[in-house]
Image (tube, grey):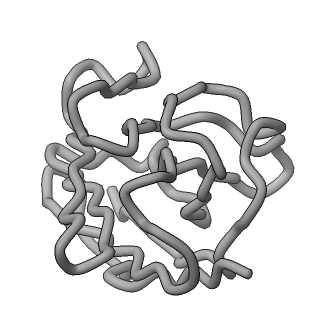
Amino acid sequence: QVQLAESGGGLVQAGGSLRLSCAASGGTFSNKAMGWFRQAPGKEREFVAVISGSGVTTYYSDSLKGRFTISRDNTKNIVYLQMNSLEPEDTAVYYCAARTRITALKSAHEYDYWGQGTQVTVSS
């Protein structure tokens, strides 16, 4: 059983930065691809970024325009999402997800475990 705990969300002004963290427990962390997804009020959950088990391969949503960076520390069992130049449209609950395969995929349906989410609010 894998447990995921996100942290680092909060309220920030437009143009600011936040770094989200997701601590994982259970199983071998480096065997799992990890992802970040988000869900805004009234909208479906959407893909943000994913990273392979080794950390070599990453994918991002095209809509992010290079503002976000996903990374992982396999010695600490943590995956990060560095978010820069935040916009009000980035306001959402951000979820960390784990896939019991090393290959990073963009679909939320491919992920087996989910955290509770952390709220990110960007004010204009």
Q: Residue at x 21, y 80 (%)?
A: 76
Position of residue 6 relative to residue 53, above or below, is below
Q: Is residue 112 left or right of residue 115?
A: right
Q: Position of residue 12 (x, y in %)?
A: 26, 72
Position of residue 6 relative to residue 109, above or below, is below
Q: Position of residue 123 (x, y in %)?
A: 36, 64
Quadrant that contains the C terminus: bottom left
Q: Residue at x 39, y 85 (%)?
A: 7
Q: Residue at x 14, y 59 (%)?
A: 16
Q: Nearer the viewer, residue 59 or 41?
A: 59
Quadrant that contains the N terminus: bottom right
Q: Nearer the viewer, residue 67 or 88?
A: 67
Position of residue 79 relative to residue 37, above or below, is below
Q: Position of residue 37 (x, y in %)?
A: 59, 48
Q: Quadrant of residue 19?
A: bottom left
Q: Position of residue 34 (x, y in %)?
A: 48, 50
Furthest residue in direction top, as rendered: 62
Q: Quadrant of residue 9?
A: bottom left
Q: Nearer the viewer, residue 71 or 16?
A: 71
Q: Residue at x 21, y 41 (%)?
A: 69
Q: Is residue 70 left or right of residue 97?
A: left
